């Protein structure tokens, strides 16, 4: 976990760009980027678009191995374990011609620590970022942080000069609906540059022939056209008709059909994402409930919900086998995962009804469940199934399913009593989950903890696991923290999501568990 990976230059000889194979790739998925401001939102589809335009110091390749990006090397300073040293790649230019220097890295990391930036939760350990010279950056943390490089895989580097020119030194305030130049325009150092953009309709990219990695990666796509299509049936029809070439997040009901379609193939694998339900545990009363108190504050109600939500049935009937029922919010390849805690408790409606009665809600209650309808695989259908399951224990659920841009904006404003969320772990370590989802919502921590959950010991462990360099001691902290939140039933896990990408059968492109297609790797079989 703490070992820096080898440089990609070792494989450069086998990955030379081929002009003969250069062609257009037409890409679709259900949702567009929320914003092109690279530090505003820590959200999957947003990162997927920005990875085509911008670079990070370190990134995860198609095998989710850590690789050098704009940093050619990184290591702990020999005289101070609180300082990470990053050696910055020389000779790199931004799309509009500005030369990359250490100053741009300092600017970007400081910008991502701003209160408007959803990325700031990854950088809470940082005390100061300094440019030691034009191509060396020192990142000093308050205490030793063995995970700092892991936290930088979606931390995109901007040009300070460009940001100052366009008045975007601070990141967009997404929750307030702020519009800035960086929301619809981008100037990165990445493999593709933006030609045109119409949010939620179409974004056209062209290959950056001045890309620093032009000879390190296949780079066979000369033009990349991204067209988000909300309707699952329309996305599939577009692939079958040849209107698009690559379909990200194939609808589960169409996997077999596409596997048997001429000229089409599927690539499949486990996704680094868990789908779950969150509840307001802390308010005196709920906004949408027909009670004058907060039923979710009672652990017995949460246990009843956990017993009533049948993840195995959702797996079979909604996901058609393309999910793995979950008991914790971390997939198996994340450090700190526990097979014991991930074991799914058998559905028991009778016991659930007993718990509801013991808690004083024998007659049930009414509440609204907020769900996205274009973010996760079959998200609205999962919520519909949950509505039916909770009706069996007297909870009448009013379902509101809406586009993810509205869902996440309202969630960020803490307007929800009951909601669906999915969570990936790009650092491959449990600290990321606790830092965002379980730590008390204060300062830069707990920024996605909309439950109001607060536990002093969990907070202590969350901070400690981000500083401890002894791996055995650190894993003991992680294990203790997971046990506490598991016993408290802070969230209702549903499943670990499986991932299917469908594409033309002459495309060579494997699934990446982060669901992050790095198109610089894509090749055409000719």
Image (cartoon, grey):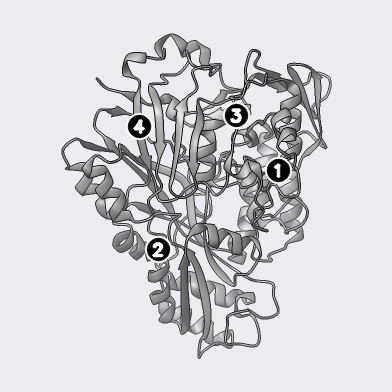
> Is 102 left or right of 431, judged from the image as shown?
right
* Disc 2 from disc 1: Cα separation: 31 Å
Q: Quadrant of the N terminus?
A: top right
Q: In this view of the protein, which residue sits in the foreground, 514 or 270?
A: 514
Mark 2, residue position: 311
Find residue 164 and name its label.
Answer: none
Of labels 4 and 3, earlier in sequence is: 4
Residue 99 image position (x, y, % from top left): 67, 18
* Disc 4 from disc 3: Cα separation: 20 Å
Residue 310 image position (x, y, % from top left): 39, 67
- Residue lying at 60% horizontally and 60% vertically, measured from the top left: 409
Say whether marks 4 and 1 touch (CB < 8 Å).
no
SS at mark 4? strand
**Residue 480 shows in the view:** no
Of labels 4 and 1, earlier in sequence is: 4
* Disc 2 from disc 4: Cα separation: 37 Å
Say whether marks 2 and 3 touch (CB < 8 Å).
no
Mark 4, residue position: 25
Identify whether 380 is placed above or below 227.
below
Find residue 188 and name its label.
Answer: 3
* Disc 3 from disc 1: Cα separation: 33 Å
> Is 223 left or right of 451, judged from the image as shown?
left
């Amino acid at each position: 976990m703490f070992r820096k990976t080898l440089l990609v230059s070792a494989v450069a000889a086998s990955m030379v760009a081929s002009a003969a194979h250069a062609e257009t790739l037409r890409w679709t998925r259900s949702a567009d980027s929320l914003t092109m401001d690279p530090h505003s939102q820590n959200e999957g589809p947003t990162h997927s678009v920005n990875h085509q335009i911008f670079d990070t110091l370190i990134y995860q390749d198609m095998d989710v191995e850590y690789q050098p990006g704009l940093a050619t090397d990184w290591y702990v300073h020999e005289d101070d374990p609180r300082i990470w040293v990053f050696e910055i790649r020389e000779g790199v230019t931004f799309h509009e011609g500005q030369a990359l220097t250490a100053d741009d890295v300092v600017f970007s990391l400081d910008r991502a620590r701003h209160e408007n930036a959803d990325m700031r939760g990854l950088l809470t350990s940082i005390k100061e970022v300094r440019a030691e010279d034009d191509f060396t950056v020192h990142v000093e943390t308050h205490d030793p942080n063995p995970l700092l490089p892991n936290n930088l895989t979606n931390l995109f580097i901007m040009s300070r000069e460009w940001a100052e020119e366009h008045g975007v030194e601070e990141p967009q305030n997404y929750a307030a609906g702020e519009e800035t130049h960086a929301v619809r325009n981008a100037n990165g150092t990445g493999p593709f540059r933006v030609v045109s953009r119409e949010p939620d309709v179409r974004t056209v990219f062209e290959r950056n022939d001045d890309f620093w990695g032009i000879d390190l990666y296949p780079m066979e796509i000369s033009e990349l056209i991204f067209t988000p299509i909300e309707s699952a049936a329309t996305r599939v029809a577009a692939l079958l008709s040849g209107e698009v070439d690559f379909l990200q997040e194939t609808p589960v009901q169409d996997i077999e059909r596409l596997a048997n379609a001429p000229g089409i193939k599927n690539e499949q694998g486990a996704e680094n994402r868990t789908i779950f339900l969150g509840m307001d545990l802390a308010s005196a009363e709920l906004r949408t409930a027909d009670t004058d108190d907060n039923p979710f504050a009672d652990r017995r109600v949460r246990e009843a919900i956990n017993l009533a939500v049948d993840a195995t049935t959702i797996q079979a009937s909604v996901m058609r086998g393309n999910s793995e029922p979950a008991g914790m919010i971390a997939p198996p390849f994340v450090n700190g995962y526990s097979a014991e805690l991930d074991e799914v408790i058998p559905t028991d409606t009778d016991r659930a009804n007993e718990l509801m009665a013991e808690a004083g809600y024998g007659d049930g209650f009414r509440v609204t469940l907020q769900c996205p309808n274009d973010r996760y695989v079959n998200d609205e259908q999962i919520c519909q199934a949950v509505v039916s399951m909770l009706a069996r224990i007297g909870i009448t659920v009013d379902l509101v399913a809406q586009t993810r841009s509205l869902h996440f904006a309202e969630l960020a404003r803490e307007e929800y009593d009951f909601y669906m969320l999915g969570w990936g772990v790009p650092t491959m370590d449990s600290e990321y989950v606790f830092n965002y989802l379980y730590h008390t919502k204060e300062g830069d921590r707990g920024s996605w903890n909309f439950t109001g959950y607060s536990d002093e010991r969990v907070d202590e462990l969350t901070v400690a696991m981000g500083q401890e360099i002894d791996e055995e001691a650190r894993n003991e902290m992680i294990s203790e923290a997971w046990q506490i939140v598991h016993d408290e039933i802070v969230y209702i896990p549903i499943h670990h999501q499986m991932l299917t990408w469908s594409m033309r059968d002459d495309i060579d492109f494997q699934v990446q568990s982060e669901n992050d297609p790095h198109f610089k790797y894509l090749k055409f079989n000719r």
